[in-house]
Image: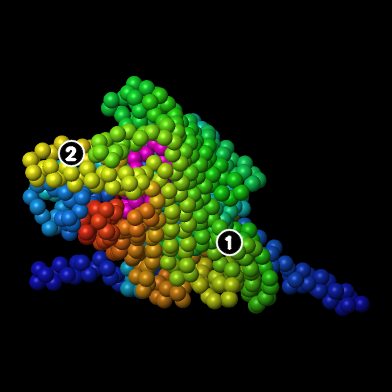
Amino acid sequence: MKYLTCFLLIGSLFIRPANAQEDYSFDLSEIEKKAFLFGGYLEARPVFSLLDRESRFYFLNYYGSEQKKSALEYNFKALLDLSYEKGIAKAQIRLNADLNHSHSDWSQDLDLYEGYLSLKPSLHFHMDFGKKRLKWGKGYAWNPVAFIDNPKNPFDPDLALEGFTVISADYIKSFSGELRTLTLTGILIPVFENANSQLGQHNTLNYGGKLYSLLFDTDIDLMFLAGPGISSRYGIDFSRNITSNIEIHGEGAYWSEYSKEIVDDEGVSDQKKGNGCSYLLGIRYLTKSNTTFFLEYYRNGRGYTQKEMDNYYRLIDSGYAMFLASGIEDELDLASSLTGFRTFSPAKNYLYLRILQKEPFNIVYFNPSLTSICNLGDGSFSLVPELLYAPVTDLELRARAMFLLGDRGTEFGEKQNKLRLELRIRYYF
Amino acid sequence: MYRIFGICLALLMVVPLSAQDGNDILKKLDRNLSPESFESYRKLINIEPNGRRKEFVLFTVKKGADKVAALFLSPDSEKGRSTLRLDENMWLYIPNVGKPIRVTSMQSVVGGVFNNADILRLDYAEEYFVEKTEDLETEWLLHTKAKTNSVAYDHLRIWVDKDRILPKKIECMTEAFMLIKTIHFKEVKDFGGGIVRPSVVETDSPLHEGYKSVMIFASIAGRELKDEVFTLTFMPNMETLRK
């Protein structure tokens, strides 16, 4: 009986009586404006990984641990958005709490992702003070012009990330004619030990700006970031709808005097300095059968060449051999500290393809997709089939598998996983 | 003599009506549906064949012929999203993503039968011209064609109530005259301020057999808005427009 009641309750979530169709009520309390807003989501995300025990990153991440064929982790997340508006002022806070279980250990984090005060004295002028994300760029998987943002995960580009502490001001002006909108943004970025520390010398002030225009039906941004202790960087991006189902976009960034950590032929870490140019070109195309193709080419000017990647892999080999022979971890510690090689996209040339089918077989709110990222330099690639479904309002289920394919010595062939299976259950409130 | 004069007078009265320019009817229909600049609250309901529903509540503002923006007030999973349209340029702002991204008119931000062009609709006369007007008993049937190829539907067939000059039914078709969806206008309501228009708009599609999307208007009122409201920079702040 208990099971029958449970079954009927679950069933009632999915099936409503046919006469409910004609109930077109609209309660005015649904549109009442509230000064204080509260929302967010709760998420559970178990992940199963099949490990590649011959890969370099397996050696690096598991050398001192119990050797495993697979790993299971449990991730829980709560993202909370709060805002309060009064007159021309609005305060916004975004809190992120993570609870993770992996390698038999629990870990937890509570971070202020965003927290800032906005002042809007007129429709033309707007100022923000505090921690926020600026999100520059038009690319879907990568944003070479996102000078003041944490790098996003190309496999999860919409994931919320932590912002930077800034003072920003926008001046907006609309026009009639081919130039429709102009927005000038000025930004000050103080660097302290506890704020924006990755953006240059402590106790200094960086500055940046962006000029946005909607010109000839094309979004165009020009941006820069400069300051003491950081390399100056300049960027441009654009986006435009070609037809009612095709959009194109692109970004270009120039970094002067940047430096990156490398490993030389002798296995010693060094700094390589130079100027770098990164760019991205992308297209989004929607077919008549509601299939969307996202295609992006990314040239990472500051990325590593195949030779630099090979030297890094040799450092891991040498460090692992040393650890097995003598227990000395110095070289593996060094390899772990070279974070540039451990980013989402460390190499020079990438291609991103995502094929998304909207609501196939008339199943509404069901969107399967297939995503692939290919390192064009070494031919290795990832393949991610995904099922996304919202069976009831505010509940979203996502199941995905990630296959990492490539020979030894290639980027995806040296990742620690061969296969990763993930289920994400997210409830919005 | 009087008889001939009477016939001539009658002809003078009848001819302008029967030859009334379809484009003028379309413009009048647009103004009867909404003022040129307005704000409105509406609910979108996607209804599946089994009766399951998903509801979205939107606050919408429009200015002139080519500017319209909407803010999602519910459900919680969509709250804070906003969409903007300037002519054929469209953007979607998702708070989690944190920046406006370009979308196209054929995409759908709500799923179901509605696409973006349905939700951020401009005046019909702005996007279509009338090729032919059929004079039916109580209705005009306007055969319209899109002015550019960037419009979501190539052809519309609009049945117009002669008394109120309001749409009763619209068929949206491809270039090859394949029916994509049918829009039914129901329950004419007085919203105040001289706005008397259908409060329920039902949409079905042969491509989504058994599915229906409904738009219910709770309020619609004229409102003067500055152009700067219709900019990408303003999209995250649309909530501040609500009173």
Residue at 47%, 54% (x, y): give it: A282
Residue at 25%, 42% (x, y): give it: A96
The quarter of the picture where residue A69 lies is: bottom left
Residue B29, percent across and down? 62, 62
Q: Residue furthest right?
A: B1
Residue type of the residue flagged with mark 1 = Ser
Q: Is residue A150 magenta?
A: yes
Asked if residue A73 shows in the view, the reply is: yes
Q: Which mark is residue A331?
A: 2
B204 w.r.t. A142: above or below: below
Q: Is residue A325 left or right of residue B67?
A: left
B82 w.r.t. A372: above or below: above
The quarter of the picture where residue A412 lies is: bottom left
Asked if residue A88 shows in the view, the reply is: no
Q: Which mark is residue A1?
A: none
- The kind of secondary structure the magenta stretch mainly shows is loop
Q: Residue under mark 2: which chain is it in? A: A
Disc 2 crowd rating (10 Å Cα; few below 14, some 14-19, many 20+) is: many
Q: Residue furthest top?
A: A203
> If the image is split into quadrants, where does the N terminus of chain A sit?
bottom left
Q: Secondary structure at mark 1?
A: loop
Q: Is residue A428 left or right of residue A31?
A: left
Disc 1 crowd rating (10 Å Cα; few below 14, some 14-19, many 20+) is: many
Residue A27, percent across and down? 38, 55
Q: Which residue is mark 1?
A: B150
Residue type of the residue flagged with mark 2 = Glu
Q: Residue under mark 1: which chain is it in? A: B
In magenta, the rendered stretch is A141-160
Residue A370, percent across and down? 34, 63
